[in-house]
Amino acid sequence: MSQRVMNVGLIGYKFMGKAHSQAWSTVGKFFDLDLDPVMKVVCGRDAEAVSQFASRWGWESHETDWRKVIGRGDVDVVDISTPGNTHCEIAVAAAQAGKHVYCEKPLTFTVDEGKQMLAAVRQASVKHMVNFNYRLCPAVSLAKQIIESGGIGEVRHARFTYLQDWLVDPAFPMNWRLRKEVAGSGAHGDLGAHSIDLARFLVGEIGEVVGMKKTFITERPAEGVSSGLSATAGEGTEKVTVDDCSLFLAKFTDGAVGTFEATRLAPGRKNFNRFEINGSKGSLAWCFEELNSLEYFSTSDPAAQQGFRKIIATEGVHPFAGNWWPPGHMLGYDHGFAHAAYNLTQSIANNRPCVPDFHDGVQCVAVLEAVDRSEEARQWTSVEVVD
Ligand code: SOE
C-alpha cells in the first residue's frame, strides 16, 4: 500500500452520502490503489446528525458549511453527494480552490450551468468525475467489451427502460425529488440520466431526439420527514413540480436508433434499469434487477445451438469482479460506487483523465435538455454538442 494519501471531503450524508462513504471505506481493502483515500471530513447542515454520521461511518471530522470543507488545506477531493440544485455552485468553488471534484448525477440541470462547471475544472486543471455507477457493474462493462470487439456487429437498435414504483401511491408524500427547484426534473433527470449515460457508453452519441414527459399525480401530501426514498406526511398537500415519466426516441450519430422510457410509477418494478441492444450479428440485454448477468446472443454460434446465453459476470476475467469474492459470489449496488472510487483514485494518482468526466455529465444534460425542447416544439430536435 502506498504511503501517499488522498484526503476526501464529502458533502451530503443521506442516501448518496452513504453509498459514497461505503465506497471510500471499502475500495482500498479490495483494490490496490496508488493513493490511500482518507475519509477526512463529511459535511451536512444538521450538526448533531452529521456528527453521528461521521463517527458511524468513519469520517475523521465534520462540518456544517460546505465552504469550510472547500477552504480546508487538508482536503484534496471534494465529493458532492447533495441534490442537484447545489452541484454547480459547490463544484465551481471547489475547482477554484484547486480541489479535484467528484459529483453525483445528473451533473446539473442545464447545459449552461454544466458548461460553467466544465470551464472551472478545466481552468483549474483539476480532475473531475461524474458518478454513473451502472456503467461500472461488471456485466455492463463486459457488454461494452463485447460491443467494442464486434461481438454484435453494427448496432441498430438500442432500447433503454428505467422503471421504479416508489411513487405509485398518490399518498406517498412530497420530498425533494419531486420539487423542480431542487431536483431539476423527475424521472427524466433522475433515471433517464442513467439510461442516457449507458447509451452513450455502449452505443455512442445521440444526435437527435423527440419526446414527452407526463405528471400523473400532480399533488401529494406535504412532506413531514424524508430520507432516501421514504417519507412521512406533514400537514396539507403540495404541488408536484416534476414529471412522473419521460419517453423519447433517439437517433444516434452513427446510424442506430433508440427508445428511452423512465418512470417511477411502474408497479412491481423496483430498480428495473434495463437495456437491450441489437446489432447486425447479435444482441445484448442486461437489467439491474439481475445485475450480475448479461444475456448475449450471437449469430456466429452454430445454428443448432443458437439462443441467448446468460453470462454470470463474476469471474476473474470480468471487469472489476476478480477483486471481490470468489467466482459466483454476487456483487450488488454498492460495488459500482466502489469501482467509481477506484477509477477516481487511480486517475488522480497517475494523472490520467477520469471517465466519465464532467464533459460526459454535461453531454448527458444536453440530451435531457433536447428532449425538453423537442416536447415544447413538438418536433425532432438536435442535441447540442458540448465542446
Ligand atoms: C431514485 O430514483 C434513485 O435513487 C436514483 O436517484 C438513483 O440515481 C438510481 O440509481 C436509483 O434510484
Image: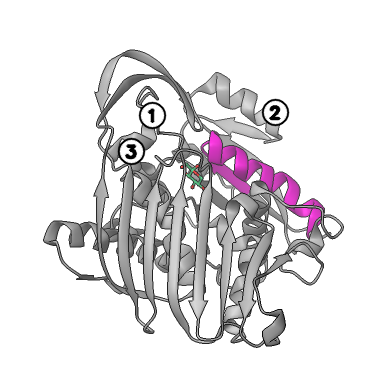
Q: Residues within 10 Å of mark 1 (few under 14, many from 20)?
A: many
Mark 2 touching mark 3, by CB under 8 A? no
**Residue at disc 3, secondary structure:** helix
**Label 1 sits on residue:** 175
Residue with the mark numbered 2: 56
Instruction: Inspect the magenta stretch and tell me whether residue 200 lies in it.
Output: no
| Earlier-in-chain disc, 2 versus 1 | 2
What secondary structure predominates along the stretch shown in magenta? helix
Which residue is under mark 3? Answer: 182
Q: Secondary structure at mark 1?
A: loop
Estimate the spatial distance between the alpha carbons at disc 2 and disc 1, rounded to whole Å. Answer: 25 Å
Front of the two marks 2 and 1: 1
Residue stretch in magenta: 8-32
Residue at 68% across / 61% down in the picture?
293
Q: Is residue 383 above or below residue 262?
A: below
Q: Establish if 35 lies above or below 78.
A: below
Question: Is residue 163 something one can see in this rendering?
Answer: yes
Mark 2 is on which residue type? Arg
Q: Does residue 172 appear to the left or right of 153 in the view shown? A: left
Q: Residue 76: x percent and y percent?
A: 59, 53
Residue 41 lies left or right of residue 325; in this view the side is left
> How far apart are the alpha carbons under marks 3 and 1?
10 Å
Can you give x and y, in whole percent of width and height, for residue 125 in the image? 48, 68
Spot occupied by residue 328 in the image (x, y as percentages of width and height): 82, 57
Q: Please name whichever residue, 46 or 281, is drawn nearer the observer in this view of the structure.
A: 281
**Pair 2/3: label in front:** 3
